[in-house]
């Protein structure tokens, strides 16, 4: 299992690369939709990245609860497979 620090580092780097933003914009309390300027297609990309990199499928219900990057880190940390 990955540590929280590893998850944060990997997610931040991947989001910065895929969404072409500065990694400094990605802070734990930043709203994902605002920081990544998400639309519905970008949201699919985000879910796909988490599934590909961590083997975690985010349900629609869970996705509505993931608002900040901190929420995303928590979700990955608690749902990753050992």
Image (spheres, helix red, strand yellow):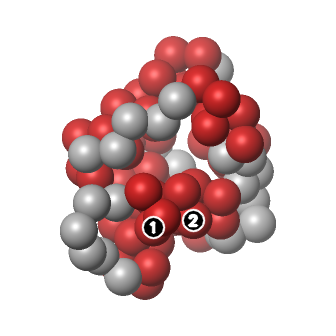
Q: Residue at x 51, y 16 (%)?
A: 41
The percent position of residue 35, horizontal first and vertical second, equals 68, 48
In the picture shown, does residue 4 fall above or below 48?
below
Q: Is residue 36 visible?
A: yes
The picture quadrant where one finds residue 60 is top right
Q: Which mark is residue 74?
A: 2
In the image, taking residue 34 as reference, residue 26 lies left or right, namely left
Compute the Cα span from label 2 to label 1. 5 Å
Q: Is residue 9 above or below residue 45?
A: below
Residue drawn at point x = 34 percent, y = 60 percent: 80
Judge by depth and name the residue closer to the eye, 45 or 3: 3
The residue closer to the viewer here, 57 or 48, is 57
Pointers 2 and 1 in contact (CB under 8 A)? yes
* Position in image of residue 25 (x %, y %): 64, 61
Indicate the position of residue 77 as horizontal and vertical percent values.
45, 67
Is 42 left or right of 40, judged from the image as shown? left
User: Does residue 37 appear anywhere in the picture?
Assistant: no
Mark 1 closeness class: few <14, some 14–19, many ≥20 residues within 10 Å: some
Quadrant placement of the N terminus: bottom left
Q: Could you tell me residue 64's position as x and y percent?
A: 71, 33
Q: Is residue 11 above or below residue 4?
A: above
Please give the name of the residue rendered at 52% of the width and 50% of the height, measured from the top-left corner: 21
Name the image quarter holding the C terminus.
bottom left
- Corner quadrant of residue 36: top right
For label 2, the SS is helix
Callout 1: SS = helix
Tell me the crowding category of disc 2: few under 14, some 14 to 19, or many 20 or more residues within 10 angstroms, Cα based: some
The disc at residue 9 is none
**Label 1 belongs to which residue?**
77
């Amino acid at each position: 299992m990955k540590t929280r620090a590893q998850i944060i580092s990997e997610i931040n780097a991947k989001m910065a690369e895929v969404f072409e933003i500065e990694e400094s914009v990605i802070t734990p309390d930043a709203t994902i939709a605002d920081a990544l300027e998400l639309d519905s297609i970008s949201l699919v990309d985000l879910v796909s990245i988490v599934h590909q990199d961590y083997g975690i499928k985010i349900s629609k219900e869970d996705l509505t609860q993931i608002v900040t990057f901190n929420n995303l880190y928590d979700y990955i940390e608690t749902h990753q497979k050992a």
